[in-house]
Image (cartoon, helix red, strand yellow):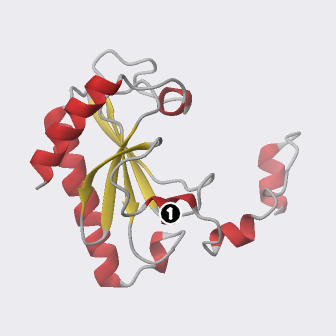
């Protein structure tokens, strides 16, 4: 802890939000509730695999942005998976990534696994466009979270990805 405080200098250290331990255990998990849903206000499922359900979120401004969600029991870390489950999760996540890569313009593909807001194993698959708001740097979260995808374009993208993934 001393090393962290030395590196952070004057930055105030804060606790995780109330209820965090319960969320890690899967209580009131929004992604557990999402698994198996074809479409809702949050997004459209484009793949239902043995280990992963993948969704195109309605939010953000990056076409092709996809979230691959572990669809088994609640886990918050990949280290909680058995070897076979981990292999299946990664292979299906890569399968979805390849379909996104084939379908959308990109200069680079990003795979983000954080879980700092929703502690359920998932990966954000982000095709970074050729004209990028911050090339060569991490994409600010606002490009994935703020705004809304065009419904017609989202539908076309969902059909394209679903057909590649079946």
Spot occupied by residue 39 in the image (x, y as percentages of width and height): 36, 48
Residue drawn at x 40%, y 59% as measured from the top left = 69
At label 1, counting other C-alpha atoms closer than 10 Å, the crowd grade (few under 14, some 14-19, many 20 or more) is few
Q: Is residue 82 left or right of residue 160?
A: right
Which of the pair 161/135 is nearer the observer? 161
Residue drawn at x 47%, y 64% as measured from the top left = 121
Which of the pair 12/8 is nearer the observer? 12
Spot occupied by residue 133 in the image (x, y as percentages of width and height): 44, 17
Disc 1, SS: helix
**Above or below 25: residue 133:** above
What residue would you read off at disc 1? 33
- The N terminus appears in which quarter of the rendering? bottom right
**Above or below 138: residue 117:** below
Residue drawn at x 23%, y 65% as measured from the top left = 91
- The C terminus appears in which quarter of the rendering? bottom left
Which of the pair 99/36 is nearer the observer? 36
Spot occupied by residue 3 in the image (x, y as percentages of width and height): 79, 58
């Amino acid at each position: 802890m001393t090393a962290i405080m030395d590196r952070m200098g004057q930055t105030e250290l804060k606790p995780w939000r109330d209820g965090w331990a319960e969320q890690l255990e899967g209580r009131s998990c929004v992604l557990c509730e999402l698994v198996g849903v074809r479409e809702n206000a949050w997004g459209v499922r484009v793949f239902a695999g043995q280990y992963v359900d993948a969704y195109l979120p309605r939010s953000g401004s990056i076409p092709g942005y996809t979230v691959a969600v572990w669809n088994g029991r609640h886990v918050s870390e990949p280290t909680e998976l058995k070897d076979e489950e981990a292999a299946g999760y990664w292979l299906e996540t890569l399968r979805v990534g390849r379909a996104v890569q084939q379908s959308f313009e990109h200069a680079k593909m990003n795979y983000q696994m954080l879980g700092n807001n929703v502690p359920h194993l998932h990966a954000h698959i982000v095709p970074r466009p050729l004209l990028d708001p911050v090339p060569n740097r991490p994409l600010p979260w606002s490009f994935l979270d703020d705004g809304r995808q065009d419904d017609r374009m989202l539908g076309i993208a969902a059909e394209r990805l679903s057909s590649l993934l079946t």
